[in-house]
Image: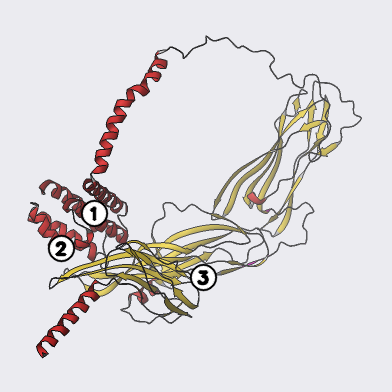
């Protein structure tokens, strides 16, 4: 009796273990439940069975600085298969408080599974342990972002520059970076300077030798006085830091760490322009300028036109300047001016020329004086106001009807004046043409007409054949599945080529390409893939042992690459090796 009871207990235990193993698990794991605002949080969504349509949560109150990184573990131990697939994210908190990582969802075998929400507490900044062997500490000591400002107490509308430099210690490398926060220049007129062709330079930071790269140069013109803040530029950087481990050749190995750097807020104290000596017509020009008014001609006939040009040239806030209006006698018809700018912006600010060009048409014979106009600006060198005046001109209209008006009053072109039109006002308009008739052409009963009419009937047999082939292809379910997998393999291999130089994206795309290729070639699903089974199936198909070993080594490189430093040269070699190996398998497999 005891023997039967023992057998029953064993059977129940075996049944429960099998049921437990068959149970699907999908859960969220965090690296820590309490962290400082200056720390990173890793979130892993782990499942024990492959699925589709993975949807992560929104990660409110966090910035995603890394991920999603996908890893797959597939092993056989004593005939028992163990499968784990993980999606990993690296998060940076935006503020302090208690937050919840919401549910992620995935579809496994037609069922939707959800993770349990995870609560996380974000505290104030914590002190980074000064462990010389800690990659995060090494990265914090070796990477610095600095904002250099040319002047912190400028005048209103005086140009200042902000140059952002990323300093990197000689024994440290930077794989990639992305902007987390971009500065917004409130209360400033701003323009970024083109940064193409920048090279790494050497310099000093806190008295030590560093390499640095200029990331951004911006020219600012403050638009109001007082204390103005420049918001910080913040970057998330992937850093390669040295370790105490060495390879078989004695070279020091590196490890990867994430580092968030910020240039910090900067405060600018903007001085107002002095009131003493400010001209009544001052419009806000600040810098060093010349002023000129010119006429294209001063002698002409009535109904002819000439151009009057008002021009300011020099260095300063040219794009923010309002040019003075020209004043001309009311008997001259003045059209709206054409505004032109020829301005370049560099670290010294704006330089160039702005101008307004007026088209003027006199209607009557006579002499028309054009009075002088003035332009005022604040000179930064002398810190005083200066006034520049134009020359006076006399426009002499030699031919045309006499002006019956008793006076030639001077007026600004702001007010439209009545103009007496002469009989020659529209003399420049042509009233005769040189049109010639052309021979009409007809489309009806031409070769093109008959060809267009018969073409639809000729296409009917071809359409029937194409449709028949399509029906046969659609009915080939097994073949369509193989062709789809083959297309995916080529697609992912193409994505891997595009991602050369970006380690994680490259090896994820490479691994997907290899998996889809196997599905197309060996007619097996991804969940059945294991190293031993791959080798057996390839060998049974007649693939040579060297080719099989090459394929296995590529798969191993995809797994190891996420945890070891990889250069762009190594990635290119792995890509070429994968393309060559796939080609060999196609030729050798029966």
SS of the residue under disc 1: helix
Please name the residue that numbered disc 3 is placed on.
264
Task: Considering the whole magenta stretch, tell me its main secondary structure.
Answer: loop
Disc 2 to disc 1, C-alpha distance: 15 Å
Camera-nearest label, 3 or 1: 1
SS of the residue under disc 2: helix
Residue range highlighted in magenta: 268-285
Mark 3 residue crowding within 10 angstroms, few (<14) / some (14–19) / many (20+):
some
Give the number of the disc on residue 304.
none
289 over 41 or under it: above or below = above
Please name the residue that numbered disc 2 is placed on.
531
Residue at horizontal 29 percent and vertical 56 percent from the top: 509
SS of the residue under disc 3: loop
- Left or right of 391 on screen, residue 58: left
Numbered marks: total: 3
Mark 2 residue crowding within 10 angstroms, few (<14) / some (14–19) / many (20+):
some
11 over 165 or under it: above or below = below
Q: Is residue 277 magenta?
A: yes
Report if residue 205 is visible in the image.
Answer: no
Report if residue 327 is visible in the image.
Answer: yes
142 over 190 or under it: above or below = below
Nearer-the-camera pick, 23 or 311: 23
Please name the residue that numbered disc 1 is placed on.
516
Residue at horizontal 80 percent and vertical 53 percent from the top: 280
Disc 3 to disc 2, C-alpha distance: 51 Å
Residue at horizontal 31 percent and vertical 30 percent from the top: 463
Nearer-the-camera pick, 462 or 394: 462
């Amino acid at each position: 009796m005891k023997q039967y009871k023992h057998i029953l207990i064993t059977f129940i235990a075996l049944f429960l273990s099998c049921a437990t193993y068959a149970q699907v698990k999908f859960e969220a794991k965090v690296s820590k439940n309490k962290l400082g605002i200056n720390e990173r949080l890793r979130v892993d969504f782990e499942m024990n069975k492959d699925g589709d349509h993975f949807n992560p949560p929104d990660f409110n109150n966090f910035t995603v600085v890394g991920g999603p990184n996908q890893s797959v573990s597939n092993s056989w131990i004593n005939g028992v298969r163990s499968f784990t697939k993980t999606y990993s994210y690296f998060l940076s908190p935006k503020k302090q408080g208690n937050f919840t990582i919401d549910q992620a969802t995935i579809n496994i075998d037609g069922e939707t599974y959800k993770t349990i929400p995870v609560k996380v507490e974000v505290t104030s900044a914590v002190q980074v342990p000064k462990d010389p062997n800690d990659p995060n500490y090494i990265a914090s000591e070796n990477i610095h972002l600095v904002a250099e400002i040319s002047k912190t107490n400028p005048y209103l509308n005086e140009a200042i520059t902000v140059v952002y430099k990323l300093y990197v210690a000689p024994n440290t490398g930077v794989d990639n970076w992305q902007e987390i926060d971009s500065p917004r220049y409130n209360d400033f007129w701003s323009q970024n300077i083109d940064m193409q062709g920048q090279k790494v330079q050497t310099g000093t930071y806190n008295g030590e030798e560093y390499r640095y790269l200029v990331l951004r140069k911006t020219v600012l013109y403050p638009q109001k006085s007082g204390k103005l803040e420049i918001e910080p530029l913040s970057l998330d950087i992937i850093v390669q830091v040295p370790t105490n481990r060495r390879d078989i050749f004695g070279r020091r190995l590196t490890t990867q760490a994430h580092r968030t750097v910020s240039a910090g807020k900067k405060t600018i104290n903007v001085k107002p322009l002095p009131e003493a000596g400010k001209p009544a017509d001052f419009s806000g020009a600040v810098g060093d300028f010349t002023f000129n008014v010119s006429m294209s001609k001063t002698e002409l006939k009535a109904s002819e036109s000439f151009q009057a040009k008002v021009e300011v040239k020099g260095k300063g806030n040219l794009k923010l300047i309002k040019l003075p209006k020209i004043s001309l006698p009311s008997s001259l018809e003045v059209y709206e001016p054409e505004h032109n700018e020829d301005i370049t912006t560099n670290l010294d600010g704006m330089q160039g020329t702005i101008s307004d060009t007026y088209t003027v048409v006199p209607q009557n014979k006579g002499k028309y004086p054009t009075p002088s106009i003035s332009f005022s600006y604040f000179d930064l060198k002398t810190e005083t106001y200066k006034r520049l005046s134009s020359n006076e001109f006399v426009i002499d209209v030699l031919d045309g009807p006499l002006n019956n008006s008793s006076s030639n009053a001077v007026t600004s072109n702001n007010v439209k004046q009545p103009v007496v039109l002469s009989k020659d006002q529209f003399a420049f308009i042509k009233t005769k043409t040189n049109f010639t008739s052309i021979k009409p052409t007809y489309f009806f009963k031409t070769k093109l007409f008959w060809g267009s009419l018969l073409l639809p009937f000729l296409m009917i047999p071809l359409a029937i054949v194409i449709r028949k082939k399509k029906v046969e292809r659609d009915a080939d379910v097994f073949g369509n599945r193989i062709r789809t997998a083959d297309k995916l393999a080529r697609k992912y291999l193409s994505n891997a080529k595009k991602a050369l130089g970006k380690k994680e994206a490259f090896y994820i795309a490479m691994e997907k390409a290899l998996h889809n290729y196997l599905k197309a070639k060996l007619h097996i699903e991804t969940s059945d893939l294991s190293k031993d089974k791959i080798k057996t199936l390839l060998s049974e198909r007649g693939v040579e042992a060297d080719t099989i070993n090459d394929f296995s080594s590529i798969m191993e490189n995809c797994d190891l690459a996420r945890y070891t430093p990889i250069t762009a040269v190594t990635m290119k070699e792995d890509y070429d090796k994968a393309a060559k190996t796939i080609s060999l398998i196609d030729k050798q497999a029966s």
